[in-house]
Each structure stands twice: as C-alpha cells, then as structure tokens.
Amino acid sequence: MAEQDKSPQSTDSPAGVGSLAQVVDWLQRYSAFISITVTVIGWLVGLGILIGQMQAIRIDIARLYDGQVRQTQVLDALSNNVAMNTEAIERLSKAIERLNDRLDRLTNKVENNTNLLSRLDERTKRLKL
C-alpha cells in the first residue's frame, strides 16, 4: 500500500499534483496552448475595442455630416434671404429714384409758381401805381 501512495499522479492537470516538477512539466506541455489562448483572447479584446472605436467614429462622422447638412441648409436659407434683400433694396432704390424725380418735378412747379407769383405781384404793384 505504501507503493500505491507514492505512485505518480496524472499530469493532465495540475490539480492534486504532488511535486513542483510535475507542475513545471504540466506548464511546459501546455505552455504553447496557454500562450495561443492568451494571444487569441488579446486579439479578440483588441478587435472588440477597435470595432467599438470604429462605431464611435462612424457615429461622429454621421453627426458631422448631419451638422454639415444643417449648415448647408442654413447657408442656403441665408443666401435666399440675401437674394430677397438684394431684390428689395433694388426695388427701394428704384422707388427712391421715382420719388426724387417727382420731388424734382414738384420743386420745378413750386419755382414756376413762385416766379408766376412774383410777376403777378409786380403787375399788381404797377397797377396800383
């Protein structure tokens, strides 16, 4: 029975291993597998982070595009307002020109009437004399 207690235990897993040499042997056997597993997990985590960053970038690009579309719409509206204001200014300018013409004509009529009144006044003075 004493020999059965000293028999080597299974080296498939380190659980219940009785000596450091057996643990080292198990680690040496499975070190490549452990290394590959850790590397694959690292790649998957990195890939997940990369995908998350790409989605965040995509969302940012969509927001920027929406902002650009809104800015374009605002610029179009402003351009339309400028065009309408330009047309209104042109109409006002023409109306002012017409009013100036009318004012000139009225000024001429007033001058003519003033001349007529002054001549009439002179004649009236002559008639009184």
Image: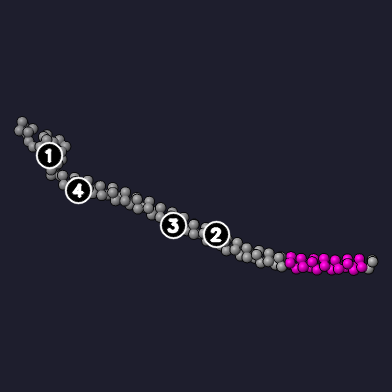
Q: Which residue is mark 2?
A: 78
67 in magenta: no
Which tag is nearer the camera, tag 3 or tag 1?
Answer: 3
The amino acid beneath tag 2 is: Leu
Quadrant of the rendered image containing residue 23? top left
Q: Which mark is residue 65?
A: 3
Mark 2: secondary structure:
helix
**Residue 124: x percent and y percent?**
91, 67
Q: Which residue is mark 4?
A: 36
Tell me, yes or no, if residue 11 can be seen here: no
Closer to the chain start, of discs 1 and 2, is: 1
x, y percentage for residue 111? 79, 66
The numbered mark at residue 119 is: none
Q: Position of residue 108 (x, y in %)?
A: 77, 68
Q: CA distance from mark 4 to mark 3?
A: 42 Å
Mark pair 4, 2: CA separation: 61 Å
Disc 3 marks a residue whose amino acid type is Tyr
**Label 3 vs label 1: CA separation?**
58 Å
Neighbourhood count class around disc 2 (C-alpha, 10 Å): few under 14, some 14–19, many 20 upward: few
Q: Quadrant of the C terminus?
A: bottom right
